[in-house]
């Protein structure tokens, strides 16, 4: 028995050494061009660190990346052994023969390497044996575009006009790293010889540069399993066949020379005043609009020494025109407060103008602000009224009856307070006071109306930034907002 126990322990030890290695599993080592490959990296250990940047190591964009942990327990001679298996999984779409490289995984402090795996990519898509009756294709209007430049993709499904189709199951192409205009997807049907053709078109915009692949579309077709022609053919069993389209490679060029946009845009700026009293707000508004996506626009901001500045979040909205092109609008406002003259500096936004086929620029002009009164603002201090001193006089002893009456009265008052007064106060606080976010939004838009509003906005910003020492009178905030909304 002792010998058997030693053999078991040795086997467990050897097994644990083998399990300590990391492995890579794939869904298939032979796929069609653009077909998905699922990859899982597995490691066993109490501490596992997977590679941080899978895309950079693999050389392809990945999707659906995720991790999982499994634990199993076993008992040998009353001793519990715990095995922890951790997995990292992701999907990608290869378009040429490639090798999944060795990944380095840190397991319990040691670096382990996976074995590389070869992936064979076939150019011929795996059409069903029934492809003479139906087929599916996708085509793109361009094979080379710039980031943010639109292109059209059309799916064409061909089926024999005499084919008895019971049901269709369509899986569209995967537009990884593209923005898709779903609202402008268009359908049409027509006859082409012996085939009925159904077309579905998409308008897409690449979001990054590089060699991107539009994966195949897949369609499953259900047809009768037999040639039954009687009245029961509607209930006859069906057979499913699948067709897979081609994939499409798109060369996406980067926006040239560090430009942040592609399209045709205009800029409008307004400033409410260029001469202002000391410590009074100056409001600057910026709006950019035109044809093209503004999602890649770098954030506009200012950092001027000695100036207090507030800004709202940029408001970006996009929509599609009837021809499928995208139009966008960007809005942002700033408030500047100072006690001496200052300059709002000019800024340039470089973009690639498609209409002119060259780099162009949007200019936010320089604004010189004259501040009158140049003395530092003296903050108004509101002196809180001191609560009146309560003078407690010694109360002479009363009779037991008086005490009983007094206690009874106090009990009644306490009951009324619990039932009516306290809930009213709670409801008042809950229903009538504004949240800090809502108050900031309303008061920020009216900051120029009074010094008090300006001070409250400053305090709200400070509190939002984490300054817990700031105390805000919510009752006064409510009074001010109510007055603003009445006016």
Image (tube, rainbow, N blue to C red):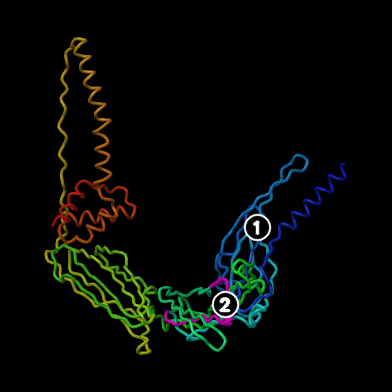
Q: Residue furthest front?
A: 231
Quadrant in which the C terminus appears: bottom left
Classify mark 2: helix, strand or loop: loop
State the CA–CA distance, disc 1 to disc 2.
Answer: 38 Å
Q: Quadrant of residue 164?
A: bottom right
User: Is residue 193 rendered magenta in the image?
Assistant: no
Residue 313 lies, with reference to residue 323, above or below; the image says above
Residue 478 lies, with reference to residue 391, above or below; the image says below
Rendered location of residue 415, percent (x, y): 26, 26
The mark total stands at 2
Residue 261 shown left or right of residue 130 in the figure: left
- Looking at marks 1 and 2 on the same chain, the residue that comes earlier in the sequence is marked by 1
Residue occupying image coordinates x 16% and y 37%? 386
Classify mark 1: helix, strand or loop: strand
Where are the magenta residues, as a range?
148-171
Along the viewing direction, whichever of 392 and 152 lies nearer the viewer: 152
Q: Mark 1 and mark 2 in contact? Answer it, CB < 8 Å.
A: no
Rendered location of residue 124, percent (x, y): 65, 82
Q: Residue furthest left?
A: 373
Give the residue number, with chain letter if any, for mark 2: 216
Q: Which circle, 1 or 2, is nearer the viewer?
A: 2
Residue 376 shown left or right of residue 173 in the figure: left
Rendered location of residue 191, percent (x, y): 51, 86
Give the residue number, with chain letter if any, for mark 1: 107
Residue occupying image coordinates x 21% and y 55%? 455
Residue 314 lies, with reference to residue 98, above or below; the image says above
Q: Quadrant of residue 458?
A: bottom left
Along the viewing direction, whichever of 124 and 68 lies nearer the viewer: 124
Quadrant in which the N terminus appears: top right
Residue 249 shown left or right of residue 469 in the figure: right
């Amino acid at each position: 028995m002792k010998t058997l126990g030693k053999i078991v322990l040795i086997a467990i030890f050897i097994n644990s050494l083998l399990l300590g290695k990391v492995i890579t599993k794939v869904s298939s080592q032979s796929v069609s061009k653009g077909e998905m490959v699922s990859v899982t990296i597995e490691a066993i250990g109490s501490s596992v660190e997977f590679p941080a940047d899978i895309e950079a190591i693999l050389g392809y964009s990945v999707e659906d990346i995720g991790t999982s942990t499994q634990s199993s327990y076993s008992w040998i001679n009353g001793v519990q052994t715990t095995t922890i298996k951790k997995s990292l999984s992701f999907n990608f779409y290869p378009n040429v023969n490639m090798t999944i490289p060795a990944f380095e995984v840190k397991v319990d402090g040691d670096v382990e390497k996976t074995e590389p795996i070869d992936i064979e990519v076939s150019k011929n898509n795996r059409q069903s044996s029934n492809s003479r009756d139906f087929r599916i294709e996708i085509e793109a209007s361009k094979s080379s575009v710039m980031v943010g430049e639109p292109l059209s993709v059309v799916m064409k499904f061909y089926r024999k006009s005499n084919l008895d189709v019971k049901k269709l199951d369509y899986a569209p192409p995967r537009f990884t790293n593209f923005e898709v205009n779903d609202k402008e997807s268009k359908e049409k049907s027509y006859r082409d010889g012996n085939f009925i053709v159904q077309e579905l078109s998409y308008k897409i915009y690449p979001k990054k540069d590089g060699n991107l692949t539009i994966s195949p579309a897949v369609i499953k077709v259900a047809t009768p399993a037999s040639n039954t022609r009687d009245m029961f053919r509607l209930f006859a069993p069906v057979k499913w066949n699948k067709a897979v389209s081609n994939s499409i490679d798109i060369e996406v060029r980067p926006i040239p020379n560090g430009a942040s946009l592609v399209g045709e845009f205009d800029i409008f700026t307004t400033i409410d005043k260029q001469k202002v009293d000391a410590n009074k707000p100056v409001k600057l508004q910026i709006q950019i609009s035109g044809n093209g996506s503004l999602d890649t626009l770098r954030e506009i901001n200012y950092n001027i020494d000695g100036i207090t500045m507030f800004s709202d979040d940029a408001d970006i909205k996009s929509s599609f025109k009837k021809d499928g092109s995208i139009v966008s609008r960007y809005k942002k406002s700033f408030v500047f407060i100072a006690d001496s003259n200052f300059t709002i500096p000019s800024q340039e936004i470089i973009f690639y103008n498609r209409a002119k086929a060259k780099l162009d620029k949007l200019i936010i002009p320089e604004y010189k602000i004259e501040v009158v009164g140049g003395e530092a603002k003296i903050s108004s201090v509101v002196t809180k009224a001191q609560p009146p001193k309560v003078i407690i006089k010694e109360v002479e002893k009363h009779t037991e009856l008086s005490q009983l009456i007094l206690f009874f009265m106090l009990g009644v008052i306490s009951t009324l307070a619990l039932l009516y007064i306290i809930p009213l106060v709670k409801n008042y606080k809950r229903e009538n006071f504004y949240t800090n976010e809502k108050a900031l939004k309303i008061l920020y838009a009216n900051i120029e109306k009074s010094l008090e509003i300006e001070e409250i906005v400053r305090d709200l910003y400070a509190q939002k930034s984490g300054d817990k020492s700031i105390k805000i009178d919510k009752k006064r905030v409510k009074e001010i907002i109510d007055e603003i909304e009445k006016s």
